Image (spheres, rainbow, N blue to C red):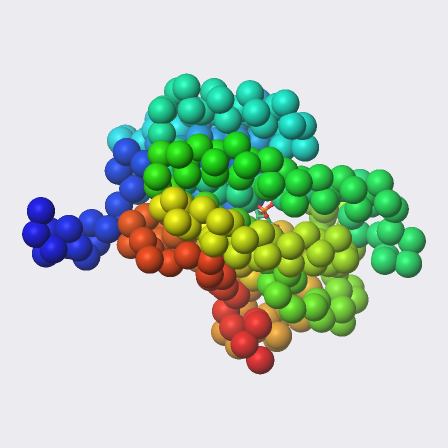
Amino acid sequence: MTNTQKYKSLERFRLDEKVVVVTGGTGILGSLYCKRLSEAGAKVVIADLDKLKCQQLADEINALPGCFAIAMDVDLTNEQSVITWSQRIIEAFGVVDVLFNNAAAKSLNFFAPLDNFPLEDWNKVMAVNVTGMFLASRELGAFMAKQGKGSIINVSSVYGVVGPDQRIYEGSWYEEMGGAINTPLIYSATKGAVIAMTRYMATYWGPKGVRTNTLTPGGVSSGQNSLFNEKYSARVPLGRMAEAEEMVGAVLFLSSDASSYINGQNIIVDGGWTAW
Ligand SMILES: NC(=O)c1ccc[n+]([C@@H]2O[C@H](COP(=O)([O-])OP(=O)(O)OC[C@H]3O[C@@H](n4cnc5c(N)ncnc54)[C@H](O)[C@@H]3O)[C@@H](O)[C@H]2O)c1
């Protein structure tokens, strides 16, 4: 193959036949990622807690022309569940091209103030955002290293990069989240850990041909009240919250061969929030 054929520009962004595992695959962003990844040609493994939701999304995707997805539920906080789940994926496909560590937890008292934030909630979020990411990466990252190729995408947040501006939460409201919202310390702690985990995995598995990068989204508009939206938007150089679709370009890029020399980096998609 000549270099011109090998590097034919847009072809390098295609994901044809790539097996892409998406944790948190039925969430607000995860479900969109699964759709867009399958439209780009990937065989998508939808991984989340609720088996039925995974299957419903797989059915929806499989009804689209040329798209393929399979439901494989997992509890990332349960070691045996992650081991069995990884084995099922490996047995089903024999190859794993992308592990997209996108899952994150919100505990019962997630928005409690730091002054009396329950330890139980701290441990629950840690168990998914950090330990779950470790377990999924240990199982599937090690397999990718053996196969000699792969891309791991770990999802952080702007609050893993900078501290939250606490002022924007006064008067915030998000019906689906049960009321007033904020960013708890455990969220920042786990999302900061994600960036460190990426750098570690990048140097550890890089020599085996496995790239690891962080995707850092800024705030995505998904039902927050208008006061919160206004206050958040005023802090963003682009002057608005992100649309979920605006995360997809970076996801496709990091999943595809177009990013074949990008390893250990943090792709920040935040409209400039962290640029001030
Ligand atoms: N939405 C945003 O504005 C935003 C901003 C920055 C970063 N992020 C990050 O993007 C990712 C996706 O966010 P989202 O808004 O779609 O969140 P979401 O809460 O809608 O989705 C997270 C998914 O993870 C799953 N999950 C939780 N615990 C699990 C477990 N033990 N095992 C398996 N799956 C489990 C949940 O069931 C859920 O479907 C998260 O990592 C989040 O922190 C989101």
Residue that appears at 68% across and 32% down: 77
Can residue 176 be seen here? The reply is: yes
Ligand 1 is in which quadrant of the figure?
A: top right
Q: Is residue 147 above or below residue 190?
A: above
Where is residue 227 shown, x and y percent of the image? Answer: 69, 66
Quadrant, the C terminus: bottom right
Q: Is residue 213 above or below residue 169?
A: above
The furthest residue to the left: 2
Is residue 220 visible from the viewing direction of this image?
A: no
264 sits left or right of 226 in the view: left
Q: Position of residue 74 (x, y in %)?
A: 58, 27
Q: Is residue 113 above or below residue 86?
A: below
Q: Position of residue 223 (x, y in %)?
A: 62, 52
Residue at left offset 50%, top offset 26%: 86
Which of 84 and 171 lies nearest the eye of the viewer?
84
How many marks overall?
0
Q: Quadrant of residue 127?
A: top right
Residue sticking out furthest to the right: 116
Q: Is residue 76 left or right of residue 275?
A: right
Residue with the most extreme bottom position: 276
What residue lies at 70% left-to-right and 68% top-to-bottom?
163
Place of residue 241 in the rendered image (x, y in percent of width and height, measured from the top left)? 55, 64
Residue at 32 percent across and 31 percent down: it is: 67
Foreground residue among 261 and 113: 261
Q: Nearer the viewer, residue 78 or 169?
A: 78
